[in-house]
């Protein structure tokens, strides 16, 4: 497998956007053989575990490394810190366990990840894996920038709502200008970067205007995550079925025309028949070590302070979520949220079985 085949394995669209950028940033090319070899080894390890132990290991693990944050964004679903959060040593252990099972990619989230001291040690200690760090962009200092300048396995994804008014309204005064400045800094340093946007009724039309995507591309953003808002019913922020369809059509147009690789949730999950959480495509570990289906669904029956990742992945919780088809597309942006009653019954039955055992 060569570099072109590796990027095509992610997506032909990913290859079209990223390959030209890679050739302009030689440090990434130097690390490519190591990453290609690791990718192949991961694919083989995951297949072997599926065949030998009927264990479905996802290619991606999301790590919410802290619940602490320096912002107070409206509608944030991250719970306030309570109890002992995992240390950097704990997270290294989790990553090592995941690597042994064949996990190739890690998404680091929070809270605000860059509040964790020496956060970048995680990516520097595991150069045979790829990382994407999701940050609000306000706490990345010069020391972190210089370290990122030397890395070749990491992308930085900054949160944005839209223009200055939309972003600062939700995130706080001055956040928009800070994020845009940080994107330009990262781009100038040759760091793979992009944005993550929570799509609501308030900003979806902004992101349906070509000029706004063109602005991102012009300052060097190569990745864009559009995540449709998941919140309480009736709060007026969740897209209607018609709005979702219109937005999806525009995203598909962007995918063909814009020099930015776009991930759209839940739209991109439709070819897979629904959500790819609970081990189908990814799994989530929260700041306290709980293994959950995804960052939004907080249910858990395994904590990695007390058990191994492998034991958690064998969980009846994840098996029953899939067997009961809770991941199939629902009426809104989150399949599991659309099956709350069934999910509660599954969690209850798992706890009952464990207590009897």
Image (cartoon, rainbow, N blue to C red):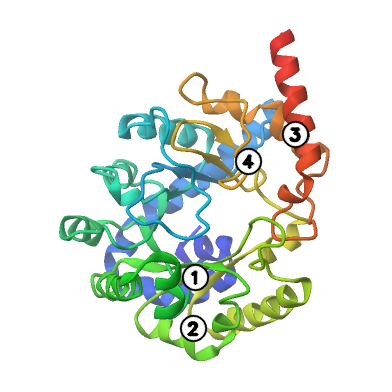
Residue 263 x/y as whole percent: 57, 66
Q: Secondary structure at mark 1?
A: strand
Q: Assess whether mark 2 and mark 1 are in contact (beta carbons under 8 angstroms).
A: yes
Residue 80 x/y as whole percent: 44, 41
How many dots with numbers? 4
- Extreme-top residue of the structure: 357
Q: CA distance from mark 4 to mark 3?
A: 13 Å
Q: Assess whether mark 3 and mark 4 are in contact (beta carbons under 8 angstroms).
A: no
Q: Secondary structure at mark 4?
A: loop
Q: Residues within 10 Å of mark 1 (few under 14, many from 20)?
A: many
Q: Provide the residue designation for mark 1.
A: 224
Q: Provide the residue designation for mark 2.
A: 213
- 50 or 305: nearer the eye? 305
Q: Secondary structure at mark 3?
A: helix
Q: Provide the residue designation for mark 3.
A: 344
In the rendered image, which quarter is residue 255 located in? bottom right
Residue 125 higher or lower than 175, as above or below: above
Q: CA distance from mark 2 to mark 4?
A: 31 Å
Residue 162 higher or lower than 33, as above or below: below
Q: Nearer the viewer, mark 3 or mark 2?
A: 3
The mark nearer the N terminus, 1 or 2, is 2
Q: Provide the residue designation for mark 4.
A: 293
Q: Residues within 10 Å of mark 2 (few under 14, many from 20)?
A: some
Q: CA distance from mark 3 to mark 2?
A: 40 Å
Q: Is residue 285 left or right of residue 234?
A: left
Q: Is residue 335 left or right of residue 91?
A: right
């Amino acid at each position: 497998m060569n570099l072109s085949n590796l990027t095509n394995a992610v997506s032909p669209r990913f290859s079209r956007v990223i390959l030209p950028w890679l050739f302009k940033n030689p440090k990434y090319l130097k690390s490519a053989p190591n990453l290609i070899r690791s990718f192949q080894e991961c694919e083989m390890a995951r297949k072997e575990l599926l065949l030998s132990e009927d264990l479905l290991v996802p290619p991606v693990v999301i790590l919410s490394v802290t619940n602490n944050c320096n912002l107070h964004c409206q509608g944030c679903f991250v719970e306030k810190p309570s109890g002992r959060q995992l240390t950097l040593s704990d997270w290294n252990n989790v990553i090592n366990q995941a690597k042994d099972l064949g996990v190739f990619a890690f998404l680091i989230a929070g809270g605000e990840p860059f509040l964790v001291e020496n956060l970048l040690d995680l990516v520097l200690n595991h150069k045979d894996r790829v990382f994407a760090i999701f940050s609000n962009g306000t706490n990345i200092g010069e020391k972190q920038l210089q370290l990122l300048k030397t890395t070749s396995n990491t992308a930085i994804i900054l949160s944005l709502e839209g223009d200055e008014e939309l972003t600062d309204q939700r995130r706080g005064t001055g956040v928009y200008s800070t994020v845009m400045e940080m994107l330009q800094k990262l781009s100038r340093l040759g760091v793979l970067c992009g944005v993550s946007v929570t799509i609501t009724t308030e900003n979806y039309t902004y992101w349906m205007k070509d000029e706004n995507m063109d602005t991102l591309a012009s300052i060097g953003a190569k990745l864009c995550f559009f995540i449709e808002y998941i919140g309480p019913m009736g709060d007026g922020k969740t897209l209607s079925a018609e709005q979702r369809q219109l937005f999806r059509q525009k995203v598909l147009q962007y995918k063909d025309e814009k020099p930015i690789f776009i991930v759209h949730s839940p739209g991109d999950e439709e070819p897979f028949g629904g959500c790819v959480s609970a081990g189908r495509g990814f799994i989530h570990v929260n700041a306290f070590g709980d293994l959950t289906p995804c960052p939004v669904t907080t249910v858990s029956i395994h904590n990695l302070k007390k058990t191994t990742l492998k034991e958690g992945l064998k969980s009846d919780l994840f098996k029953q979520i899939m067997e009961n088809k809770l991941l199939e597309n629902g009426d809104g942006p989150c399949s599991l949220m659309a099956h709350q009653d069934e999910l509660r019954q599954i969690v209850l039955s798992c706890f009952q079985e464990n207590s009897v055992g």
